[in-house]
Amino acid sequence: SALTQPPSASGSPGQSVTISCTGTRSDVAAYSYVSWYQHHPGQAPKLIIYEVTKRPSGVPDRFSGSKSGNTASLTVSGLQAEDEANYFCSSYGGDNMFYVFGTGTELTVL
Amino acid sequence: QLQLQESGPGLVRPSETLSLTCNVSGGHISTTNYFWGWVRQPPGKGPEWIATVYFSGRTHYNPSLKSRAITSVDTSKNFFSLMLTSVTAADTAVYYCTRLEWVTYGMDVWGLGIMVTVS
């Protein structure tokens, strides 16, 4: 089943916000293949974190990822207006469930 | 730069088969490091992985779709496709095609998506 994320998060410009992504021992806990995506309405989703902590080229270092047990987290530091978007996580799930997404979190910059 | 573009009908009748195609441009689908995948997002809900296919034809499917989904790849024409049979209103969603890197399991390229309504 889907990874669990809070439906919403918010912060003021310049602040930091952390979004959680809770899975199970079969996906998030079992593999270091957690990814995070940023999705602005009407655009294609964008990969911003892969393998729990790594950033693709061009993604600002304000975005960082971590994992503890079956919960992964995305932290956005120094919030900017353009960070307002929907964020969702994903994980490799092995043979039973090859790939699974999170429920998505709407980030609002106040 | 590699680009993906979905195409297909925007409206499908209940019980019929949804057929979508993803055209790959700026690169070749026969690349060893990547799977090609389908993801959908129903209105107001989170994304759902549907299926992935490798250029060799090897596939993985979301068990929740109960064998209704079939994905395949055409290396000569550089596209891959999805069929979803016996659709219902619950299959109404934006459908995306994606590229999934095998080593990192990150979906690094996405199409813009196509809205499909079952009605």
Image: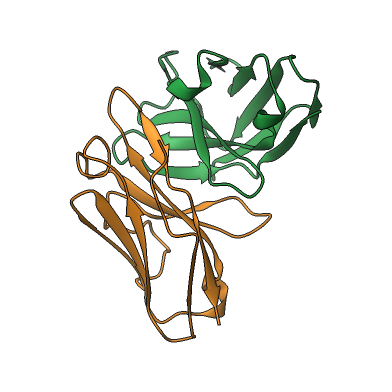
Q: Quadrant of the N terminus of chain A?
A: top left
Task: Give the answer, above or below, for where A80 lies relative to A54.
Answer: below
Residue B84 at x, y percent in the picture? 63, 18
Q: Quadrant of the C terminus of chain A?
A: bottom right
Task: Give the answer, above or below, for where A11 lies relative to B57.
Answer: below
Color used for chain B?
Answer: green
Task: Give the answer, above or below, for where B83 lies relative to A20.
Answer: above
Closer to us: A82 or B24:
A82
Residue B102 at x, y percent in the picture? 33, 33
Closer to us: B54 or B49:
B49
Color used for chain A?
Answer: orange
Colouring method of the image: by chain
Q: Residue at x 73, y 14 (%)?
A: B15
Q: Residue at x 60, y 50 (%)?
A: A44
Horizontally, is B113 left or right of B8 in the view?
left
Closer to us: B111 or A32:
A32
Q: Residue at x 45, y 79 (%)?
A: A79
Which image quarter: residue A24?
A: top left
